[in-house]
Image (cartoon, rainbow, N blue to C red):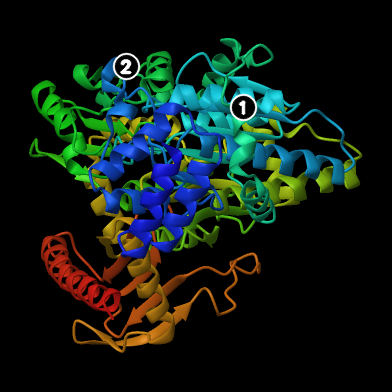
Amino acid sequence: MSTELLSRVDAARADGRLLAGAAENLKAWISSGVLPAWATSSIGELFAQGAYSELNDRFYRYLEFGTGGMRGRTIGAVSTRAEVGIPGAQDSPQYPGVGSNMLNEFTIIRATIGLYRYTAGWLRASGRYDTPKLVIAHDVRHFSRRFCELAASTWSRLGGQAFIFDGPRSTPQLSFSVRHLKAHCGVVITASHNPPHDNGFKAYFEDGGQVTPPHDKGIIAEVNKVPLAETAAHLCVDLAKVVTLPPALDTAYLTTLEQVVLDPGVFKGSKLKVVFTPIHGTGGISTEPVLKKIGVKYEVVPEQAVQDPRFPTVKSPNPENAEALSKAVELAKATKADIVMATDPDCDRMGTAVRTRKGEVILLSGNQVGVLLAEYRISKMKKLGLIPKKGSKSAALIKTFVTSPMQDAVGEGHGLKVINTLTGFKWIAAKMRAYEEQMKAAVLQKEGIALDYDATDFRTRAKLLQKHSTFYVFGDEESYGYLPADFVRDKDGNAACLMFCELAAEAKKAGRTVDEQLDALYLKYGFYLEGVGQIYFEGAAGAAKIQRILETYRASPPKAIDGVKVKRFRDFGRQVIKDADGERIPAQDLYFVELANGFSYAVRGSGTEPKIKFYIFARADVKTAKQLPGVKAATKTALDSARKAIEADAAARAES
């Protein structure tokens, strides 16, 4: 069959039905001798169907191991009988899709080998000859458990020590566990809120944060060196030397989560009523137990409490989307709950809705929730004496550049340092790591104490960081990711639920609704509104269009948008841009466009999905509560018009 397939590849390449890269990779895979019978049969089926677009998408490149890992399809747009095989529970195919650009056994093994070799080499270069330790967690997606066990088996076969959980766990728990176990790196098998056909391999380093320079580039280089033939020795899973983590690891994480609550007494007598949904994912594993422990009265959307890789009750398991929260909102209306909270499949993001004074249940954006949490936690920390009442430049609010500038206003209004980072929580984690290392070095030098950072309680840590470094007060990104403290080094949906419940409970005890609290902040800081524009481009052709948009922005920046002149253009890939600590922001294809009317927007390619994204920011002055509704309406109209113009400009650039 292999000879016949190779002939078909040559013929399809010759007549233009296969891209050159796809044909090259197909021939390498077919000739490798590594593919099991089902994989070879699957390729044969795709040729028999004339599914050349599918073959191109599956083979035009190797699935890219980027700076945070890799994410992509594990089930093809066209599935074959050989892959479906005997379906498992919840319609999981028997085998993941074959292809160099697919997430499957072969790409998982290559990633694990590359990560192991980089980690082992880095340890040796650092004068450390420890056995490389890896912690792996996974969510509920198709093949997640299989990929987890395959990675653990590969790691241990290479000579490392691998730790896995007995079932699905959230991404933030993995981040915590890497630090708690003093492991050298970690992996989460997840595609976050992507569609059901996707999965991913997200890599973390010993600080518990996603990999950043120089580790990211080093890992990528090692992964790219691994030949397909080397995967054959690891296809059979052997868990004999793999450690399954005990319940004590769950208890340790839950205990840390409780420290998120700044004022536990706020729940007593608040009568706060909550609806929660994990949207078929891992959210219920940690969020529910800790909500019970602190005394929050909540109900769960019953049909969405079931872990299910199909996410059958939603179009997308993304708490940024109103549709994903619709069942929770219905339940909140029926039960007269005060707030709704929803987490995505790996529980690193949280979306919310709140009941208004009139009894409506309205959604809040990620930017609005971030502003509310930042104001609440900074104010509460001042009241509790964790930071000075006048603020301190040794205490920081950290956010991404594409997160609402209203948070800059909140942080600066409270006298804090505000740090802006590139998109991705790994950059926020990198600042935490730098602050931690600076503080530990100072304590060792000045006091002769080798501080165990993770064993230091929250209040002591806050005091030492402000004395010797910078205290991380709060951090978030507009895409519904929040983190209250540095015990975890990635956004934490479990912790976000606790923070939001605390905020809502205090508001209710004071006789205010959450949206009224937000309006009060608009009167204090001005009205801010944000919008997101995006255009999807699937497959190989789509990737080329995304690249074309990014290149033309650099070569030919827009002169005007929606009839408004461009006042300033910043290219993060070419210009030197520094943060509030005076540190240079790493170069990236990110552009900021400032308009003459005070609006601005950012342009970047999504790091997780095949799309180009635009983050649009507007601000308007507002003096009285009476003016606020009109200001909101006028600003929204202007922002929507700008978004359409930005998307139209991008669509034209994609075809240029």
In the rendering, which numbered label is found on residue 192?
none
Work out which quarter of the rendered image holds the C terminus and state it: bottom left
Q: Which residue is at 83% across, 30% downward? A: 130
Task: Say what secondary structure mark 1 lies in.
Answer: helix
Q: Which residue is at 73% across, 49% downward? A: 467
- Name the quadrant containing residue 183: top right
Residue 171 or residue 135, whichever sits in front: 135
The amino acid sitting under disc 2 is: Gly
Q: Which residue does the numbered mark 1 point to in the structure image?
A: 234
Density class for disc 2 (Cα within 10 Å; few <14, some 14-19, many ≥20) is few
Mark-to-mark CA distance, 1 and 2: 23 Å
Q: Position of residue 616 (x, y in %)?
A: 30, 67
Residue 211 vertical placement versus 283 (above, below): below
Q: Which residue is at 65% across, 69% downward? A: 582
Say if residue 77 shows up in the picture: no
Residue 252 vertical placement versus 124 (above, below): above
Residue 559 located left or right of residue 499 = left
Residue 187 located left or right of residue 348 = right
In the rendering, which numbered label is found on residue 88?
2
- Name the quadrant containing residue 164: top right
Q: Position of residue 101 (x, y in %)?
A: 44, 47
Residue 597 vertical placement versus 30 (above, below): below
Look at the numbered discs 1 and 2 and tell me whether their residues touch, using CB distance below 8 Å.
no
